[in-house]
Image (cartoon, rainbow, N blue to C red):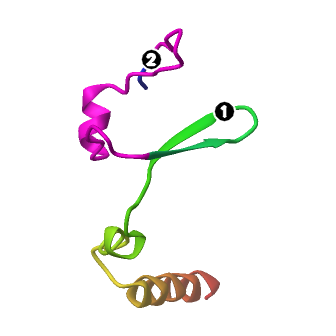
Amino acid sequence: MAVATVSSKGWVVIPVDLRKKYGLQPGKQVIIVDYGNMLAVMPLLQNPVEDSVGLLKGDSSLTDALRAERLAEMAYER
């Protein structure tokens, strides 16, 4: 968790490690969402389709995971 202070102008400095992690360069736009009891700051994706390529890539396919889960359920039912 990181702690930041809001300046008199409303500025908040995002810690350098988080800026690097999320690719926040000077001039990069962010989205600020009000969830009622908290705020979320997220990078604005310029091209959401291209920016999300490979985001959900895993070690195994969903089909393999579902097959393994079903086999485990069948073994448990016996």
Amino acid type, residue under disc 1 in the picture? Met
Which class describes the residues within 10 Å of circle 1: few (<14), some (14-19), or many (20+)?
few
Q: Residues within 10 Å of mark 2 (few under 14, many from 20)?
A: few
| Residue at the (31%, 80%) spot, across then down | 60
**Residue at the extreme top:** 8
Mark 2 residue type:
Ala
Does residue 49 appear to the left or right of 23 in the view shown? right
- Which numbered disc flags the more N-terminal residue, 1 or 2? 2
Q: Residue 38 carries which label?
A: 1
Front residue of 2/22: it is 22
Residue 13 lies in the magenta stretch: yes
| Helix, strand or loop under label 1 | loop
Q: Quadrant of the N terminus?
A: top left
Q: Which of 71 and 59 is in front in this view?
A: 59
Q: Give the range drawn in magenta.
A: 4-29
Quadrant of the frame with the C terminus: bottom right
Disc sitting over residue 26 in the figure? none
Q: Position of residue 17 (x, y in %)?
A: 25, 31
Residue 67: image location, x then y, percent? 46, 90
Q: Which residue is drawn at 53% across and 9% down?
A: 8
Q: Is residue 31 left or right of residue 29?
A: right
Q: Position of residue 28 (x, y in %)?
A: 34, 45
Relative to residue 35, is residue 49 depicted above or below? below
Q: Name the residue under label 2.
A: 4
